Amino acid sequence: MESTPMPEPLRRAVHELVSESIMSCQEVLRYTEPDQAHTWKRMTLYRATDAADTLNLVAMLIAAYCQHLGMSPDTLHSYLQVDQQDNRAAGPQDGDRAHLAGLLGQEPSYEIMRAPQLRMMHGRGKRQAQQAQAPENDPQKLFAEACLHGLKARLSDEVEALDSYLSPDVAALARKVAEVLEEQQPAPA
């Protein structure tokens, strides 16, 4: 297998786009907070689709470069996992509705009960709803959320506002992240 590095202009474009997507992901989390009740529907959908579109652009830039290098179409389709592609233009599908029904604690419909895939999605939603009753205790999830909020708070200079919309544990960790980002970093040699 070839071991040449990614060209620097492509690498920088990928880094910029991934950073942009991460900021959209942070906004998705921000708009789920109770103080955003008036706008969460619109803004979580806007920011989630912004993040998805931006990451799709990353994948397409890398795919275009691979194509430019002569990668076979079959290999490229395999790497792009095209069989997993969902088209959101069609709107929510049966699996999405089954998942939501489970999340909301609704009994599965006849259609859900007849289709194994839909039963699985309903069950996944039901398990997630049960897990939501307990406090979040996965350190990796809490750390990821705190990093996103801490980064955004530092960039927008709104560190003090973290306490107004985050749980005390996540807010404390997000403040620590923001403090580390505030420290002067040594210049590269």
Image (cartoon, rainbow, N blue to C red):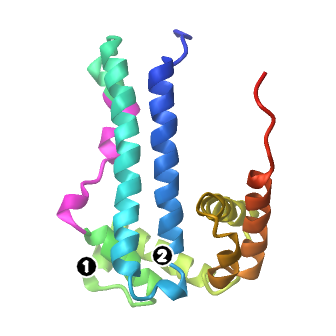
Q: Is residue 179 left or right of residue 124?
A: right
Q: Residues within 10 Å of mark 2 (few under 14, many from 20)?
A: many
Q: Where does the magenta region start and end?
A: 77-91
Q: Main secondary structure of the magenta part?
A: helix
Q: Quadrant of residue 83?
A: top left
Q: CA distance from mark 1 to mark 2?
A: 33 Å
Q: In this figure, which residue is indicated by the disc labeled 2?
A: 31
Answer yes or no: is residue 28 visible: yes
Figure check: 28 above or below 105: above
Figure check: 37 above or below 124: below
Q: Quick one: 123 or 163, which is closer to the camera?
A: 163
Query: Is 79 inside the magenta-drawn segment?
Result: yes
Q: Quadrant of residue 91?
A: bottom left
Amino acid type at mark 1: Glu
Q: Position of residue 13 (x, y in %)?
A: 45, 32
Figure check: 26 above or below 6: below
**Element type at mark 2:** loop
Q: Residues within 10 Å of mark 1 (few under 14, many from 20)?
A: few
> Which numbered circle lies on residue 111?
1
Answer yes or no: is residue 136 visible: no
